Image (tube, rainbow, N blue to C red):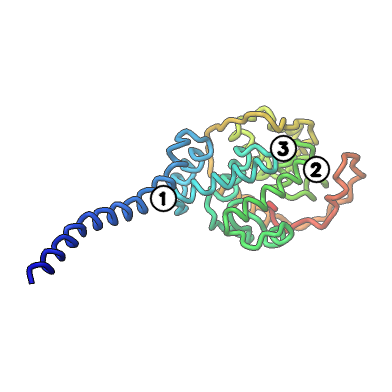
Amino acid sequence: MGAPSQGFTERDALSPLVRHALGLGVLLLVIVPAYLTARPVMARPDSDILRMARETIEESSAEVTIAEIVEIEAHIRDVAVRYDIPPILVAAIVEAESEFNPRAVSRRGAQGLMQLMPGTASSLKVSDSFDPYENIEGGVRHLRRLMDRYRGDLPLVLAAYNAGEQAVLVYRGVPPFPETRRYVSRILRRIGRADLIPRARGTSNAVVPVSTNAIDPGITLTVASSSRSGWAERQALERALSARPERSISTPAPVSAVGYADALRPPRPGQGP
């Protein structure tokens, strides 16, 4: 009877060590993923995009978490670099369009971070506009096409993204819509390129002519402070477009710039892509 009791005691003496080892393993499984998740925030505490997103979300009513902000920034950097567009420009457009809210829906039905209309999203092969990566992928692909069409002329690119390519074609420059002009100026100021803000000639309804202010793909853009909510700007534009009476516009003379012929299509409903 004594021998079995002694054997049981020796085996039982190992169990605390086993329990400690198992506990340590579980602890590592919990801590390591949490550390890896937090690393992007710790690695870039002064990231322009993160700072822009945090400031914007703090001033808005959108419920967006820090984890979502980190994920959105990573998507912006990944997609923007792949399409050779400054990430901060994409971030400024996201801020103006949706205030970094991946669940944003406009009055006219534009969806997600870069506010894609359902028809545009479909043409860009975006199946879920509320998925941050898909939305950014589609929006930046559209932005790259505009950059190529307007040869890097940022005011025209932003005006086309906001008011539509047909409006830029018809007016041969930044359309005379106050809301679109504010949108263009806001983003150019936000990325530190206020020098590119087009100046209207004559009356307040004068069309801003096509310029040659092309952006150097390798230029370093900085972030300036924002004075007004981009979401408020978008809602103001959509209200104005809803209230604006329909009117016929005579067909302009052919434009010689390469790529403008591709813009000859029926105007899209509302502003933005």
Q: Earlier in the sequence, mark 2 or mark 1?
A: 1
Q: Badge 1: how crowded within 10 Å, few (<14), some, or many (20+)?
A: few
- Circle 2 sits on which residue? 149
> How far across and down, in percent of the image, does residue 137 sit?
65, 51
The residue at the point 85 percent across, 44 percent down is: 259
Front-most of 212 and 129?
Answer: 129
**Mark 2 element type:** helix
- Circle 1 sits on which residue? 33
- Circle 3 sits on which residue? 155
Write down the quadrant of residue 268 in the picture.
bottom right
User: As shown in the figure, which amino acid type bears the numbered disc 1?
Assistant: Pro
Q: Measure the C-alpha gap from mark 3 to mark 2.
A: 13 Å
> How far across and down, in percent of the image, does residue 8 sit?
15, 66
Q: Is residue 168 above or below residue 266?
A: above
Residue 263 located left or right of residue 140: right
User: As shown in the figure, which amino acid type bears the numbered disc 2?
Assistant: Arg
**Mark 1 element type:** helix
**Mark 3 element type:** helix
> How far across and down, in percent of the image, does residue 16 sit?
20, 57
Q: Is residue 77 above or below residue 18?
A: above
Q: Earlier in the sequence, mark 1 or mark 3?
A: 1
Write down the quadrant of residue 108 in the picture.
bottom right
Q: Measure the C-alpha gap from mark 2 to mark 1.
A: 44 Å
Residue 19 located left or right of residue 153: left
Q: Nearer the viewer, mark 3 or mark 2?
A: 2
Q: Badge 2: how crowded within 10 Å, few (<14), some, or many (20+)?
A: many
Most extreme residue toward the bottom is 1
Q: Measure the C-alpha gap from mark 1 to mark 3.
A: 43 Å
The residue at the point 89 percent across, 42 percent down is: 255
Front-most of 82 and 4?
Answer: 4
Q: Earlier in the sequence, mark 3 or mark 2?
A: 2
> How far across and down, in percent of the image, does residue 117 sit?
67, 58
